[in-house]
Image (cartoon, coloured by chain):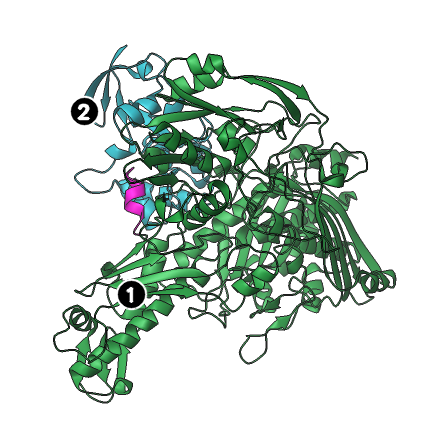
Chain colours: A green, B cyan
Amino acid sequence: MANQYIGQPVKRREDNRFLTGKGKYTDDLKLPGMTYAAFARSPYAHARIVAIDTSEAVRSPGVIAVYTGNDECGQFSVPCGWQVDFKNGETMKEPPHPLLAVGKVLHVGEDVAIVIADSLQQARDAAELVNVEYEELPVVTNARDAIKEGAPLVHEDAPRNMVYDWEIGNPKEEVDNAMASAHHITRLDFMNQRLAPNAIEPRCYIADYDVNADKYTLYTSTQNPHLIRLLMCAFALGIPEHKVRVVSHDVGGGFGSKIYHYTEEALLTWASKKIGRPIKWTSDRSEAFLTDAHGRDNCTLAEMGFDKEGNIVALRVKNEANLGAYLSTFSTCVPTYLHGTLAQGCYKTPLINIDVTAVFTNTNPVDAYRGAGRPEMTYILEHLMDTAALEMNMDPAELRFKNFIPPFDGVNQPGYQTQVALQYDSGNYHGTLRRALEMVGYEDFRRQQAEARKSGKLLGIGLSTYIEGCGIAPSAVVGSLGARAGLYEVGQVRVQPTGKVSVYTGAHSHGQGHETAFAQFVADKLGIPIEDVEIHHGDTEQVAFGMGTYGSRSLAVGGSAIVKSIEKIVDKGAKIAAHKLEAAAGDLEFKDGKYTVKGTEKSISFADVALTAYVPHDYPEGLEPGLDFSSFYDPANFTYPFGAHICVVEVDPDTGKIEIKRFVACDDVGNVINPMIVDGQIHGGVVQGIGQALLEGVSYNDDGQMITGSYMDYAMPRADDVPFIETDRTVTPCPHNPLGVKGAGEAGAIGATPALVNAVMDAISTHGVKRLQMPLTPERVWRALKN
Amino acid sequence: MEVSIQVNGKEYSRDVPPMMMLAEFLREELSLTGTHIGCDTVSCGACTVLVDGKAVKSCSILAAQVNGQAVKTIEGMAENGNLHPIQEAFKEHHGLQCGFCTPGMVMTAADILSNNPNPSESEIRHGLEGNFCRCTGYHNIVKSIQHAAQSLK
């Protein structure tokens, strides 16, 4: 019974509190003497602030304080966490992002004043009374418009609104030459539209300054409490880190949007010291649409060249990435190191050039949203592949098999060196596609499709074979690429005297089920019942340090840190056991929760070793008491999950409505600790991918007003928009981390979108429709069919 | 104004502002924070509770409007420490991830199943139309409700 829990669908231990209404989300907390904040936000996308009059708001009932950018807080700015330089070596443009607007507002919804009052209603009422005189300025919202000469400037010191330009891959001239001699070129010119992440729990912060201890506590709905503490203390406010505690209990979904250090977190922290009372702010949904960092928003021109046999000869992509009005924490790495570096996909493409220009616009900041750069690149590659197959009259599965990188396990065969810097760890792209084709019954479907077409039915099938890069690392490498943080993780394993185990992880769960999955492998590695293991996260005073959860990194990086500590525990335990058993440590075997002298019956249980460590009466000389280790794990490489998604649709020719008949996903996320949780991650990701393909899109009008700022206007998948998702997996372990795991959080959102769009294009190809812009609304499809 | 509302079987009388929403009444007056607010505009369903047995979005109904009525929240579903079969099914079939939409989903499921003990997949999906989940893709929520229907028979 070496692995009692690993690989099992263990039911989640966190579920009871959520199912009985006992979750502890930030908005559920109420502190004694707590006050409430509301914001006066900019109604304009670009305007000069001529004057702010807060006198009426200050006099309003219950108001304790009103602050604007003219106060001390206007001098503080939240930082960007990743530096990307221009091609010519100049540093990116990085204007300050003040906690409250100073002199100008740059997007609708920007914080102009904070009002703090005894009750929420009083704060909201008073925020309405903040009188701001604006002088409107010209607005730019689209990336391609923003880089034109003469476009309105969002920041005066960023000419043509450029944040940076950046390039990766082979020299452009080589790629251009290969493209010029290609037999066929498939070209896509499209918009990877802006999305609103829409975690169902709105952002919420409570800041509480304790004057006696001179100490701040920030309760925040974040995905990475330590990172928020670091950014806020060291960069935003300049307050001592050891005097700040950041707590993030239960968090109602993140999808990237709760990674970043938002201005409101720092502002509330600063203000709570000013007023000497706790302050709570809970975003409403309109504020969430206007101010939670968005995702995607790239204008893309992509070309793939093929020879006569269908072999890819070159890939060329030119991208304009809209980063919004300010640089959000990780915004700058999304269209570059999380995007351009994935351009190899699953293919042997010999020549690749990716050219990116990132720009400021008068819109809300854009940052990582589920997948972050990888869905955008996967959409490029996979939509190119199916489109090319249609254009060259080839089967899209065959075209892929022809171009796939051959299987490699990273142990017997080396990792695969891409043209775009990364080296893949292990992969078997043939395997996942073969299985997905089998699941969907590909050949049968093609026969049915041919029959259906005779009677005018529009049936289509779309493929997508993605690769993902998770757990980005090692720190030295990402540092050389501009990351201003390390990307390791911390895991502490504290064995209590009775052999019970408390684990402290720097990863953070906001739906991923760490309390269960982490406990599964800890219990197995120590050979103890899962009930004896407790996982702690989300409090900077409990957990030594951590980088949090995003980029599908928790198990691959956070799990590995815990394993490292377990190894130290087992090694130290062996010394204690050897002493007790009067044997050499090297002669012991640790299995099923006990140390045994090899080839004998002599053994001692893990619990007895733990007790001995804490009651060291009969104990090895010179060995420290206790059984408690903490480790930092800095991975050797990224992990590279992959998979194949296939979607079958029927399009109604009279209405343009798309029905998803089947969605099949065969993913390879390496070893699996809890298959139930992994499947759940895939389901959720796929449906977010479906959302982008069919429904979602943030729109601004020419004045920079968001016209999709509520659930009435922004369409997200509901239960009756989607089918059951059929899942299966292959297992190609990660060769460089101790659990062999790769990460599953984003796979669905990466693979699904192109599979669905490809299916629709396949269905309507008989009507001569060549290109369609996402989201594929019935209206768009219907118009295309009519033209 | 004075309101008397029975919540999870217990009578509560409170003097509340006339504009107080039921969700706020539950969360702020009674500290029943299992009822969540995700949008304030009846769109997300996280705040769903049962009022006299029917699913209602508590963010958009005044506390005063349910004066004299019986409200059931997620906190009232489990009895004597035992999960309700719907809660049990959600746990068994991984019908929740971050847990934020979960109370609304469970209450809506109770409404669906009380009206239709044998719902088809499409009836369940249609019944969940007013509730957003951003984590599960609805897959395991639908499965959970299908299984709950079986165990409630």
Residue that label 1 marks: A523
Point out the residue furthest to the top here. Answer: B1
Q: What amino acid type is highlighted by mark number 2?
A: Lys
Whether residue A227 is visible: yes
Question: Which chain's residue wears label 2?
Answer: B
Q: Secondary structure at mark 2?
A: strand
Q: Is residue A425 located in the magenta-colored stretch of the structure? A: no
Q: What amino acid type is highlighted by mark number 1?
A: Ala
A614 over A768 or under it: above or below: below
Q: Nearer the viewer, residue A396 or A374?
A: A374
- Which part of the image, by quadrant, shows the C terminus of chain A? top right
Q: Would you say B107 lies left or right of A583 here?
A: right
A382 over B115 or under it: above or below: below
CA separation in Å, label 2 and label 1? 42 Å
Question: In this rendering, which labeled residue sits more in front, label 2 or label 1?
Answer: 1
Q: Nearer the viewer, residue A401 or A326?
A: A326
Q: Quadrant of residue A315?
A: bottom right
Segment tinted magenta in the rendering: A13-23
Q: Secondary structure at mark 1?
A: helix
Residue A491, horizontal then vertical, whole percent? 36, 61
Point out the residue furthest to the left here. Answer: A617
Residue that label 2 marks: B10
